[in-house]
Amino acid sequence: MKVSLVLPSAYVMRGDVRSILNLASDLAERHEVEVISVRRQKEKPFFPVSGQVAMRSLIEARPGSRQLLPRGQMRTEVALWRLLRTLKSDVLITTRPGISVQAARSAPRECVKIAWEWGRPAVPAPVKRFYPRLDAVVTSTEAARDDWRRLLETAGPPVHVVPDALPGGLWPRSRMDNRIVATGGRLVAARAYDRLIRAFAIVADKRPDWRLRLYGSGPEERRLRDLVRDLNLHNHVYFMGTTPDLAGEFAKASIVATTSRAETLGMTVLEAMGCGVPVVGFDGANGPAEYIVTGYNGVLVPEGEIEMYAAALLALVDDDRRRRSLAAGALETATGHAAAEVSAQWEQLIGDLR
């Protein structure tokens, strides 16, 4: 079976890209798999991907590359249309509403077409019009599935839940003895790292031997650095930059924190749990709330309650036995997201659709 996965770029640091490459790598052990990146900005993907996965791109965007067509949206649409019209795959998995609409319109009829979605479309009208031509929509969480069912109503294709995949192979395990709280992801407003920094200021005031490490980069970095300076946390909060091995860094921590306002993916949560680290998050964020169970693998705090969030962190900081108990639950949660388990669910779904 030949499977093609199409995404805007396989070369950026995003949780959904991580999940896509994890799935592709595991499927490639049994099938012919290719990842098609609409744009290619770098020489190699940010995250590791199996050498068995064929990689190709439509738009060469690396510095110094020559362009045969004018830049812009029209060029991208033409390149995507050409790809889809000539695609010779058994299964096509698209990972953005814009790409999925194009697939519904142009991909060969005999190809199984699946839209893999993490968020609602910015413009729902084309989705409602063309998604009925697809064979299925897949979401990573039940909340997202319900959201898409409401959007597509009765005319759309069936919507299924398949969880995100953690990388295969051995995972690093936290020893739970480092006085470190960690978090990771793009430094963007939706992640609300300012709330984490303000909460950690309370923690640092009472437990000055603990440190907060932020992994990632993005447009919010300067503002967050200014906040650290204003709160006099320069000896407590560290900006660690980007890393393709976030799991390895989480394994050095004893708590992982997420403060996102609207995270629908939760890969940060899953990677932390894969390392046996409990997670503290806000109850309003779709992704974390799907995975975190207070008292089992982490702690959920009412949305926006920064002082309660700080209190939850402090409670774990001061209770080594509870941290280790939650770590065991985190490892059990991660088991259901192992690459082999997730790819088996995809294979079952594809088999049913074919």
Image (cartoon, rainbow, N blue to C red):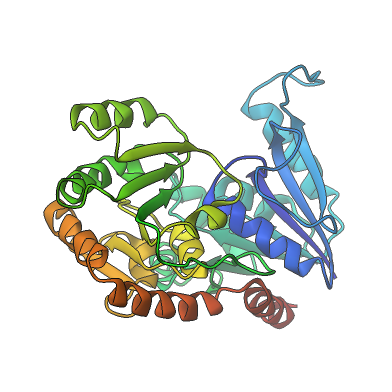
Which quadrant holds the C terminus?
A: bottom right
Residue at 22% across / 66% down in the picture? 318
Q: Position of residue 276 (x, y in %)?
A: 47, 70
Do we see residue 156 in this rendering? no
Residue at 77% across / 49% down in the picture? 84
The reply, left or right, for residue 220 in relation to residue 172 is left
Compare residues 193 and 89 and report the one nearer the observer.
193
Q: Position of residue 152 (x, y in %)?
A: 45, 64
Compare residues 115 and 233 and report the one nearer the observer.
233
Check the image and report above or below for 15 versus 140: above
Compare residues 309 and 277 and report the one nearer the observer.
277
- In the picture, residue 37 is in which quadrant? top right
The reply, left or right, for residue 56 in relation to residue 172 is right
Residue at 75% across / 54% down in the picture? 107
Residue at 81% across / 47% down in the picture? 55
The reply, left or right, for residue 306 in relation to residue 53 is left
Which quadrant holds the N terminus?
A: bottom right
Q: Position of residue 353 (x, y in %)?
A: 70, 78
The reply, left or right, for residue 39 in relation to residue 221 is right
